């Protein structure tokens, strides 16, 4: 088909205008900074339900794009304005509009790593998450004791203490405290396998009792080789109906513990005071790791009933009170007299 001669100027004008618009759009989408030096990172949080226009305004305000209008146009042309993954994005002025858009539509959110040490209490975990800006400590602890929320996790316990498995996690901001807790409890069941549940039944222990004993073992020793021995001491005491006499259980019940366990603390009236109350405390006193959970279910063989610190991170284990008293004299009383 032959184009009428009178149309040619109009077609040329349209093409020229389109080309100019394309070039202008490309220029507007160029990086704001062309410096070869690394650009400072801007952490931009896109809230859940934000519109593409709101995102464009946010990026313009943060001086990450030249103007929101070409960015919005790019979003419409690429059909990207219909799906905006919420989250926190690490962006900088050395990125083009296309690169920024690509990061957002592909959900390349920032993940924050947090390591929960073995033996941490729920309160310590809440504080750590608060320091990382991942959760409000008060809300986290409220959920740890919220019966309805606990039941939603298919658990029938008064508290999630002991069920928050210590590990290294990566969370994106914003993250709900409920989701953090669900992640940690789900991780526990990756460790507390069906085989271990069968083993617990063989030992006539509930999951909660296993986690309770494991938490006491966790707080008593940080030495891998000793966990089975500590477990043996407690199992032997439980069988003989002898109080566990574990200092960490007493400390768990104390308010404002200053790091110095006093003699009067051992007589405090509390179900967690295993100097006064026989058997296991009513629940976990911390969140144990995999080794302590396994040690609770597979104690070492032996007749040990006592152990005392050697003051170097390890312990001396004894089967009789006489042997234990000699160990106490050697490792506790004699050194104390030398330094007095």
Image (cartoon, grey):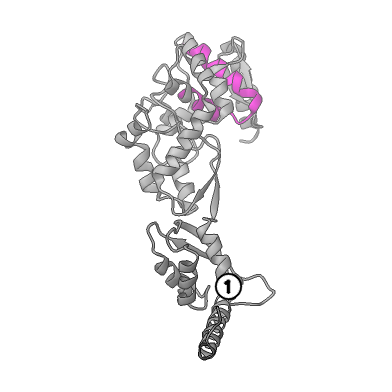
At 45% across and 43% down in the image, what residue appears?
Answer: 180
User: Is residue 235 a member of the stretch shown in magenta?
Assistant: yes
Q: Quadrant of residue 257?
A: top left
Viewer-proximal residue among 267 and 73? 73
In the picture of the structure, the residue carrying the numbered disc 1 is 93
- Residue at (53, 81) in percent of width and height: 18
Total numbered labels placed on residues in the image? 1
Q: Which residue: 34% across, 42% down?
A: 142
In the image, 23 versus 62, the foreground residue is: 23
Residue at 47 percent across and 74 percent down: it is 60
Question: Please, which residue is most extreme toward the right here?
Answer: 36
Compared to residue 178, the image places residue 96 above or below, namely below
- Please tell me in which quadrant of the rendered image residue 181 appears: top left
As rendered, which of 8 and 258 lies closer to the eye?
8
**Who is closer to the viewer here, 230 or 167?**
167
SS assignment at label 1: loop
x and y, in percent, of residue 251 in the image: 45, 33
Magenta residue span: 212-238
State whether residue 310 appears in this view. no
Q: Is residue 12 magenta?
A: no
Q: Determine whether 58 is above or below 115 in the image.
A: below
Quadrant the N terminus occupies: bottom right
Residue found at the far front of this picture: 1
Q: Is residue 221 left or right of residue 282?
A: right
Dominant SS type (magenta)? helix
Q: Position of residue 152 (x, y in %)?
A: 34, 33
- Using the image, determine if residue 160 lies above or below residue 279: below
Image quarter (top left, top right, bottom left or bottom right) of the C terminus:
top right
């Amino acid at each position: 088909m032959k184009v009428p001669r009178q149309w040619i100027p109009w077609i040329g004008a349209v093409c020229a205008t389109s080309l100019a618009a394309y070039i202008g759009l490309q220029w507007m989408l160029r990086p704001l900074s062309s410096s070869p030096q690394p650009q400072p990172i801007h952490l931009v949080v896109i809230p859940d339900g934000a519109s593409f226009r709101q995102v464009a305004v946010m990026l313009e305000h943060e001086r990450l794009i030249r103007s929101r209008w070409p960015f919005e146009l790019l979003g419409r042309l690429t059909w990207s304005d219909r799906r905006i993954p919420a989250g926190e994005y690490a962006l900088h002025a050395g990125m083009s509009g296309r690169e920024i858009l690509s990061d957002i539509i592909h959900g390349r959110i920032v993940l924050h790593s947090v390591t929960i040490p073995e033996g941490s209490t729920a309160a310590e975990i809440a504080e750590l998450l608060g320091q990382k800006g991942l959760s409000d400590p008060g809300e986290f602890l409220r959920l740890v004791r919220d019966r309805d929320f606990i039941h939603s996790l298919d658990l029938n316990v008064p508290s999630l203490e002991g069920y928050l498995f210590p590990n290294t996690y990566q969370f994106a901001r914003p993250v709900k405290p409920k989701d953090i807790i669900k992640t940690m409890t789900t991780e526990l069941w990756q460790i507390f396998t069906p085989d271990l549940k069968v083993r617990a039944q063989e030992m006539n222990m509930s999951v909660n009792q296993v986690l309770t004993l494991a938490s006491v073992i966790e707080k008593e020793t940080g030495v891998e080789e000793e966990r089975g021995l500590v477990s043996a001491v407690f199992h032997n005491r439980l069988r003989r109906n002898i109080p566990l006499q574990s200092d960490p259980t007493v400390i768990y019940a104390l308010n404002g513990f200053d790091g110095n366990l006093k003699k009067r603390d051992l007589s405090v009236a509390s179900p967690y005071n295993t100097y006064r109350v026989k058997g296991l405390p009513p629940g976990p006193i911390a969140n144990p790791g995999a080794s302590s959970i396994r040690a609770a279910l597979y104690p070492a063989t032996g007749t040990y009933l006592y152990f005392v610190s050697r003051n170097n991170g390890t312990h001396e284990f004894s089967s009789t009170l006489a042997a234990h008293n000699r160990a106490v004299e050697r490792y506790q009383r004699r050194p104390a007299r030398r330094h007095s």
